[in-house]
Image: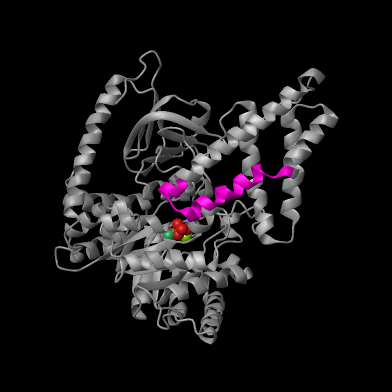
Amino acid sequence: MPESDPSKPEIIVQGLAASQGIAYGQVFLFLQSDLELPSYQVDPDKRAEEVARFEHALLVTRGQIQKIRDEVEKNLSSNEARIFDAHLLVLEDQALIAETIREFENSGSNIETCFNAIAKRYIQAFSEIDDEYLRERSGDIRDVVQRVLSNLLGQAAASLSRLADKRIVVANDISPSDAAGIDRSHALAIVTDSGSRTSHAVIVARSMKIPAVVGTGNLVTRVKNGDWMLVDGYDGLVIVNPGEQTLFRYGKIERIKKSIEQRLFKANRQPSVTLDGVGVVLRANIEKEDEVALVKEYLGSGVGLFRTEFLYLSSQKIPTEDEQEAAYRKVAEQLAPAPVVIRTLDLGGDKPIAGAPSLFPREDNPFLGFRAIRFCLENTGIFKNQLRAILRASVVGNIKLMYPMISGSEELARANAVLDECRQELRSQGVPFDEMMPVGTMIEIPSAAYTVDILAAQNDFLSIGTNDLIQYLLAIDRVNNRIAHLYEPTHPAVVRTLRHIVEEAHRNKLKVSVCGEMASDPELVPLLIGLGVDELSMSPPLLPAVKYVIRAMTLADAKRLAEEALGKSTAREILALCGQFYRERVPLE
Ligand code: PEP
Ligand code: MG
């Protein structure tokens, strides 16, 4: 580790541990506020210089975008790199450039002011066009304009997709689309002042195997670019300017944690079976097709949750049916014969498509608003594209389809009717698909949890989304860090609801999985298994620790734990029971 600067005081900030690991490095502050543009008149004899300055900024921007494009193509895919071709085209837009120079010649105002004014008119015009593709280009133009302006001002544009070096990303918040585009080769850790353990930026950090700490209050106002920082994703600590003692201590902690991780990783080759011989299926959650490598590395039995909206968020535009089919096929083929549960779009909430503001008007309560299946049932064109893509891909591997955010049987029937229409269309076009493809529902809204008996007939399987189920049961916004301490997975209402779902599902001969973050917490896994949950699905790097606890317990003990938990009246008591159960069986640390 590099040496720390002893002249600076150490600042320790306690946040919430969101993704495991320890990182040490320099800060990259990600601030999304608009650039402050100076406005002044340019001397008439400096006008040629001002135009040259503009042309130079365009040139520099072109070089930057080209570099990112090449890196994205190398690290992700040529598909994802294509968005940057659109960005390069904006830089070649002669109308935009010529109009800026004309404005400058007429007004004499500095070039930033002129470029900004013309670009704003452009963006406005594009966002009003009646063609979805062109409308979405306004997002590309906005992005490029920001880059050009930052180059004119000599400032680094806030962009997570092009970190110059290995950095710890510190932000007030990171939107899912920014998180999806994060520079995976250079981000050492993610720290956000807001957010919670289940916010989607955190889910992305876990899939990247980098530490994350959230809920750090006002850290962005206390650090600057280049500050040295240590991030402890195990205990949720952030230490700015760590002293030598601290670095030494953490070096040791990191070695201990690494050795535990290695032991777990080795033990992960064993089957997922309890001491009394009961198998528990462990699957992986993924956001992108290239995470299949992680699923294999950590030996997930296929994918229990493919959050397909990330395909949309990372490209900021809606992928075509063919592009989607290719992604689903690739995952299914690589993991066959293990199943891949493809969840239909869960956009909205904290995941609007940045490039398509017209599809997601601002809402006061986005988590209670136009989200997931509600969005899909009103945008059947987009929905049907995805359903057809999934059906077409279902001829390979073992694909299952799952709907998010279903609130009751009528909504589910509407979704299934659209799916049937797609089946009919494909049949009449002679396009093959798996007629028997299983279809399931996520149980993540209380109204669905308490109508499982009614929903059962319309489903082949169920999966509990505890992230949202807890949010809606306890009325705790899952991304609001002010109330994050009230987000309690062991609240008696949560435990009782889980028991109810499992009992009703089993009574109706359906298997139940849990694919929310609760499934990846080794201390809570015995409770879930004791309540009767059949399968668990989680971020791949968390699979070994979960398998370890499963192999260290009996189902009979887990059932007793669940019974005892159901008799308790507070979240704290249930958590204590789970903690004790875990420590008695996993004396790892
Ligand atoms: C959940 O709500 O638990 C879930 C798995 O879905 P998401 O986190 O994508 O909302
Ligand atoms: Mg959910």
* Residue in the picture at 72% in, 22% down: 49
Question: Secondary structure of the magenta portion, mostly?
Answer: helix
Rendered-image quadrant of the C terminus: top left
In the image, is residue 398 above or below residue 246? below
Q: Is residue 347 left or right of residue 278?
A: right
Q: Nearest the camera: 386 or 490?
A: 386
In the figure, is residue 375 to the left or right of 260?
A: right
What residue do we see at 54% from left, 75% from top? Answer: 415
The answer to which of 146 and 268 lies nearer the viewer is 146
Seen at 62% across and 31% down, the residue is: 150
- The reply to whether residue 470 is in sight is no
Taking 294 as reference, is 483 above or below it?
above
Magenta residues, start to end:
72-94
User: Can you tell which quarter of the image residue 524 is in?
Assistant: bottom left
Residue plotted at (32% across, 20% down): 3
Where is residue 471 drawn, in percent x and y?
48, 56
Q: Quadrant of residue 563?
A: bottom left
Question: x%, y% of residue 371?
Answer: 57, 61
* 156 horizontally vs 28: left or right: right
| Residue 225 counted in the magenta span | no
Return the x and y of residue 549 as percentages of the image width and height.
21, 55
